[in-house]
Amino acid sequence: MKNLKIGGVPEHFNLPWYLTLRNKEYTDEGINLRWKDYSGGTGQMCKALRDKEIDMAVILTEGIVRDIINGNECKIVQVFVESPLIWGIHVANNSDYKKIKDLRGTKAAISRYGSGSHLMAYVNAESNGWDAEKDLDFEVINNLEGAIESLPKGEGDYFMWEKFMTKPQVDNGTFRLVGECPTPWPCFVITVRNEVLEEDAESVQKIIEIINTTTTDFKNIPSIDQMIANRYSQKLEDVQEWLSLTEWSQKQLSIEQVNLVQNQLLKLSLILKKVPAHQLIALPKKS
């Protein structure tokens, strides 16, 4: 039995992994795959990959591209979710800020530096014509729970997070949604440590095949919308809207997509240089 550990955010995007693990599909192929939730998101998972705490991660594209360029010895083996992530821009319900333009020069609450909430604050700043050096400041709040606690106290002025996962907090009056910022690229990729790719590419390939079989027909699973609503405390109509907007993938990032991400990160001074695509992506070798 091969032992591998994979990490991801505890969000509805990753329900296909839960289903395949519940059904012991990896065990049937001689793979003991263990899942670990990372509520702190991409920055926390980048560290876990570096520390060899996990072997694989389902992680935000822009975050892992930046971290690989900065020395994380991993490669992207496939896109997991092809569609953009729709980042909601939230303020506390008791905040005086009403529109995105009001947030210029205020403090963004982020899960940690290098996280999606950190990097997308730069993308949002650029799309609104802000000066990243002058108009961005940050408050580390760790995760969604940290934002729920911190924003009403004035510890951070706005918080960017996937808008459907934060919809319950908008509905109950904790947050107000003042805008949206979709990623300009596929949002989630599957990343594997180089050491694992070199030593056990066959198991990685088998894991990819299993998850791809599930994501191909995921939307057709009977009552999948109700299952997601129950598991993630979402309204059924919100889940149905989210499903209509979300597309899983069974393909690798294209060279064009790799360049798009790198060009944006370079433009925002989030990386110092671009690297050849082969340093970022790899296809597991088939047995």
Image: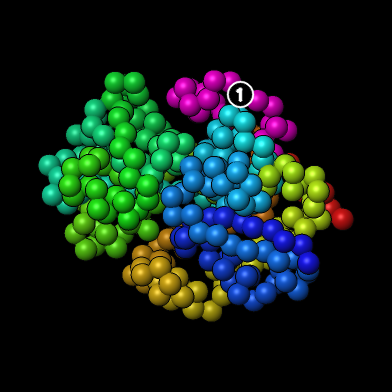
Query: Position of 124 compared to 148: left or right?
Result: right
Along the line of sight, the residue nearer the viewer: 92 or 267? 92
Query: Position of 201 compared to 168: left or right?
Result: right
Query: Position of 63 compared to 31: left or right?
Result: left
The stretch in magenta equals 260-281
Any part of residue 172 in sight: yes
Query: Can you say whether 157 is above or below 11 in the image?
Result: above
Q: Residue 159 lies in what quarter of the image?
A: top left
Say if the magenta span includes residue 276: yes
Residue 73 in percent (x, y) is at 67, 37
Image quadrant holding the C terminus, namely: bottom right
Q: Amino acid at mark 1?
A: Lys
Along the line of sight, the residue nearer the viewer: 191 or 226? 191
Residue 27 in percent (x, y) is at 72, 71
Query: Position of 139 compared to 8: left or right?
Result: left
Query: Can you say whether 112 is above or below 266 in the image?
Result: below
Query: Can you say whether 234 is above or below 196 in the image?
Result: below
> Mark 1 sits on what residue?
274
Residue drawn at x 34%, y 30% as measured from the top left: 125
Any part of residue 120 in sight: no
Say if the magenta span includes residue 211: no
Residue drawn at x 79%, y 51% as measured from the top left: 201
Query: Can you say whether 280 is above or below 26 in the image?
Result: above
Image quadrant holding the N terminus, namely: bottom right
Residue 184 in percent (x, y) is at 48, 39
